[in-house]
Amino acid sequence: MSNMVTQRNGIHRFFLQLGSKWAIIFLILGAILFSIISPGFLSFNGIQVILINSPFILLLALAETFVIITGGIDLSVGFVMGFASVVSAKLIALLVVMGMNDLFSIITGIVITLFIGIIPGFVNGILVARLKVPPFIATFSMLGITHGVSELLIKGVVAKNLPVLAGKIGNGSLIYIVPGKTVSFFIKPLIQRGGNLIEILPTVFVIPFIFILIFAFILKRTKFGQHTYAIGGNVDAAIRAGINVKNHLIKIYMLSSLFATIAGILYVLRYITGKADAGTGFLLDGIVAVVIGGASLYGGIGSVWKTIIGCFIILVLENGLRMLGFPTFYKYILVGIVLIFAVLVDKLFPELIHKEN
């Protein structure tokens, strides 16, 4: 009898372990299915396309991860991204017109934009932490403000006239290989017409990945991360533990705007233009990726790496459907279905989601 009970408990633990990893299983099965239907899906070029399309959802999902763990939400990140793209494009173009060196103009424009870009997050943090405005209302208001300011800056015309160097940076790669001849990093080698050049790891993916590594460590291994989880788990307990909750929340919302600002800068470097609505299509994807990754909208639970799995589920669905010739709206349908499934699993089997967070 005891053996039967032990066996039954072992089976239960096995399925519990399996269920807790449903997202990564879904990702693997989805990639296999699309590769069978469309043989080029998991080819070198197919993977490169996914990586090239990944930076904006990765950064906005990273922003939402920190905010959602504290029990809040940031609806402004999409238009903060657009605002940053407009500001950086305008600044870089202006500095070039003033006669500054292209590289210096790009670097200076990016640095100034990073400082300007955290202002919306600072205001959001003040509203939420000190004035007790609900995060939904505070960040939705900032969504409107940043969108309006962006439109005022461009007056209905996209920000452009950036130097060619900006596009070379944004559309470059970490590694270049000329088969049988040379390997170079960051600098694209000159090749003869018709020559073969292999590009590995797009720059626009490498930059977000560096931030992912840094902030995954910060969230998991540092006091800042511990305080973030504590606030989301129980604000009153966090206060009693001596955590300065108000200041910490302000930092969290500033961090969220920082990630959105970096996404806006990368948008400019990739597309050589700045648009007020540059990030509108990525806000929902970012939030969905966090939920698919097992974060609780009530706060206290979440993981950067599981959020990244959620991001790649969306990217795989998007790229797979595109390769099969399906219109974009099919992606929204499938993402919605996956989101509902994630929420139902969280509600019906919370031990599956919360087990390893």
Image (cartoon, rainbow, N blue to C red):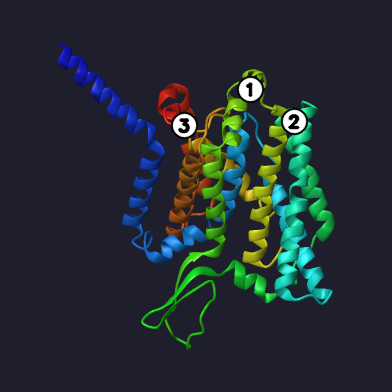
Amino acid type, callout 3: Asn
Identify the element where label 1 is drawn: helix
Q: Earlier in the sequence, mark 2 or mark 3?
A: 2
| Camera sees residue 346 | yes
Mark number displayed over residue 330: none
Identify the element where label 2 is drawn: helix
Q: Earlier in the sequence, mark 3 or mark 1?
A: 1
Query: Would you name the residue on which mark 3 appears?
Result: 357
Q: Residues within 10 Å of mark 1 (few under 14, many from 20)?
A: some
Amino acid type, callout 2: Val
The image shows residue 66 at horizontal and vertical percentages of 60, 37
| Picture quarter with the N terminus | top left
Nearest the eye: 231 or 243:
243
Q: Residues within 10 Å of mark 3 (few under 14, many from 20)?
A: some
Q: Is residue 59 above or below residue 238?
A: below
Amino acid type, callout 1: Ala
Identify the element where label 3 is drawn: loop
The image shows residue 290 at horizontal and vertical percentages of 54, 38
Query: Would you name the residue on which mark 1 appears?
Result: 238
* Residue depicted at 52% across the width and 34% down the height: 302
* Residue depicted at 69% across the width and 45% down the height: 257
Query: Would you name the residue on which mark 2 appears?
Result: 128
Displayed quadrant of residue 276: bottom right
Q: Is residue 279 above or below residue 338?
A: below
| Camera sees residue 162 | no
In front: mark 1 or mark 2? 1
Displayed quadrant of residue 182: bottom left
Distance of label 1 from label 2 (alpha carbons): 16 Å
The image shows residue 113 at horizontal and vertical percentages of 75, 57
